[in-house]
Amino acid sequence: MLARVANNLFWMGRYIERSEHLARFLSVNYFSSLDAPDELSQSRQFVLRSVMYMSANEIIDADITLEEEAVLFNVGLNQEKPYSILSTFINAHENARSSRDLISTELFECINRINHTIKAYPIEQFVKSGLYDFTTIVTQSTSEARSKIKSTLLHDEVYAIIMLGVNLERAIQVSRIINSKMSDVAASKELNGDSTEGSYQWSTLLKCVSTYDMMRRYYKKTPSRETTLEFIILNEKCPRSIKNCLSQIYKYICIISKNKEIANDSAAFLIGKMKAEFEYKLISDINDNLEEFIADLIEKLVLIAVKLEDNYFNITDTVAVAKEEEKAEVKVEEKKDTKKETQNQTQ
Amino acid sequence: MKKTKTLPLFSTYDLDSRFYDELFNKNEEIRSIYKTLFEIFGKYSVNEFDRLNKQAKDSFFNLGITFQVYGEKEVKEQIFPFDLFPRIINNKEWCTIEKGVLQRSKALNLFLWDLYHDQKIIKQGIVPIDLIKSSINFLPQMIGLDPPGGIYNHISGTDLIKHSDGNYYVLEDNIRCPSGVSYVVGNRNAVKHALFGVFNQYNTHTVVDYGARLLETIESVKPNGVDAPVCVIITPGVYNSAYYEHSFLAKQMGVVLVEGRDLFVENGFVYMRTIYGPEKVDVIYRRVDDLFIDPLVFKKDSLLGVPGLFSVYQKGNVTLVNAPGTGVADDKAVYTYMPEIIKYYLDEEPILSNVHTYHCSRKDELKYVIENIDKLVIKPVDESGGYGISIGNKLTKEEIEKVKKTILAEPRKYIAQPIMSLSTHPTYIDENESFESRHVDLRTFTLLGKDVDFVLKGGLTRVALKKGNLVVNSSQGGGSKDTWVLKK
């Protein structure tokens, strides 16, 4: 498989997964806040801030009043914002397009159709009444895309690269959602004292990663901080837990690295090490310094992505290395130029 | 003009006696080959057909069988307009076409070999040296080079029209990077989905075997000493208007689709950068134009090519398909010598006729052209995609004067042909909710390999969607149709 195309497939997987998390987070937070038990959680400003923090990674100053329709537009359908669901899915589509020869017709058609649907969704309708409809379309379509990945591709390196992207992104998004909810909990605690330590924010968190029902089934009691975090970080049976994601990532990196000798600073090594650490981790080990733990987790996951790039996507031949470096400086321009050059080459 | 309003879907179908209509004969009777098809279409109500038509178009859109249109700010995705009414070619007619295009491709291949070796045809005065000397598509770098299997034009696209006399004429040969074959397969699938019942009534040749035959062809010209060649397609990238076709062909053949930046040259071989390091490449089906394939030899600022690629080709360590420099032979001025070229190399009479052509480079013919522009089509010799064409009877007086000036400034650059009457074919026109007659041509696809050849039984029927328009190129607002070649 071409290194460039591997990179495209990896990012296709990541962007598909990311679109789903963005859509679900937006929907769950918005709708659960409408009848939230405490005043703060019901506050529009509070919810919009939480959405902006998760989607755009932006902390909004306290003296700024956010406009609901503007926030919804930005995180949903604003193509100018790189973090919007629209931009995210367009990226997934672009990556699929440039690796079109490797993926199945069914998968490409599916991604292409979703792209058309999202692009054509009326903005006015979305910000006024279509929030639920739109986010549902996105979450359902992305899961359809994942099912096409699983059921129509050859389960070889191509598949492993995509799934590596999907699971790495899932681990990152779930970590970010935990991070974002913990900061909501902290804010609400500051305002209302310990009384809101109750289940509302934890239930929302579980719903944000669509594990609420299964968590109830597993523990058979109201979610608390400890059980919620244990479930979505350390329960291997939960398909969206960090631990499960790491197992998946490990499985796919093994397919890709083909049991070759693993260097100490490679992605494969890092993944194996993380997986081993999680194997014997208990919630009591992390409960006391959770913020730190999550921050460290996100950092490590991002590092894995960087290492993957070094190990598999940036393959350069010995001769071309020097030239590549030269080229890198003009890379931004290059894209534009090739665009012009490429358009006319047809007879 | 007579009206043929027998069925709701044909309420505005006009017949123009100047042209050969493929559906109706001169007495306004359905030609026998279309009888069954016409009856089936006759059963549809306008609404029903509209729905089928829309579904077919949506399927192209969803499958991403599209090209990009670049606007100021936004890139728009559009489908290549498609018409559901298939064009049918009977077996006898097809046999002539097939033999004819194969004959031309073979002759062109021998012509290219000669041009880049001894140039006997020029020395013997059959083709003038000027034709080659002044052609920008003649690549001196190719002189004396022996491409594997002796093949230059592995893939040829031949454009044919049916004139008012009912005979096929060749309009031009495309032997650089002819495109359109993916639409042949796409159109067939769309027609199958929409009109599945029809296929029981007609015994039609398949077109899905093109990918397999193409792979066989390009594998046959592998470099010496290679057992199982690694073949790739090189594309200018996702922004190219034919990118869909490149990815389609790669998928059909199961080969890797690369861009220039995926390849590099080391120690006299070409490699691609894979996730496990370099992998040698043996055959490259290139969809990048000659001048862009290697910045060290051709266009220095090309970002689409691979530095050093041509030197590997010279060493015989990689095969390029089609060979560089083929453009010199699909030049529109060379076209006019095709009957002589066929005779010279194959000692055969041309099976398919050429359209009579006037060379503006010849004094007497230039005089005729200048005096009769209104009766002629003026074409630049080295452009493709329908650019730069002037159709005499569509020009105003001022425009004619302008064209005269342009020709006189550079006579070698232009040829002229009588305005040919492209046949007409029923084409659904959305605004009028009816079929109307529109001009069509036919592009066939011919493969030449080492000891193998193949003509795709079918082809791309291109249709000029604007009423009365004779230019069918997609870049000029043309669409296409499925083309059925009957087995009997």
Image (tube, rainbow, N blue to C red):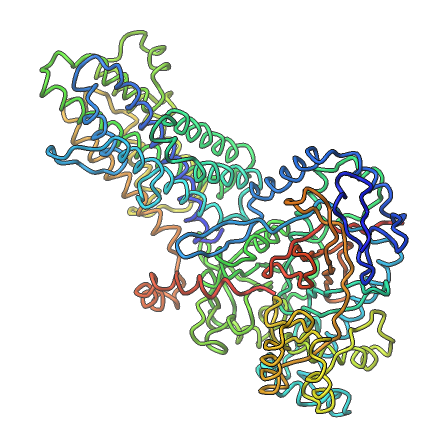
Residue A265 lies, with reference to residue B410, above or below; the image says above
In percent of width and height, residue B141 lies at 57, 82
Residue B388 vs residue B401, the one in the foreground: B401
Q: Position of residue A65 (x, y in %)?
A: 16, 32
Q: Quadrant of residue A79?
A: top left
B446 relative to A3 in the view: left or right: right
**Depth check, front residue: A270 or B130:** B130
Q: Nearer the viewer, residue A282 or B184?
A: B184
Residue B118 visible (yes or no): no
Residue at the top extreme, as displayed? A220
Quarter of image, res B396: bottom right
Q: Residue at x 45, y 27 (%)?
A: A140
Figure quadrant of the C terminus of chain A: bottom right
Residue pictured at 63% horizontal, 78% vertical = B400
Residue B44 visible in the picture: yes
| Number of residue marks | 0
Q: Looking at the picture, does residue B485 appear above or below residue A63?
A: below
Viewed as shown, does residue B103 lie left or right of B114?
right
Near-viewer residue (A44 or A104)? A44
Residue A103's spot in the image, x, y percent? Answer: 53, 43
Residue A290 percent location from the top left of the image: 17, 26
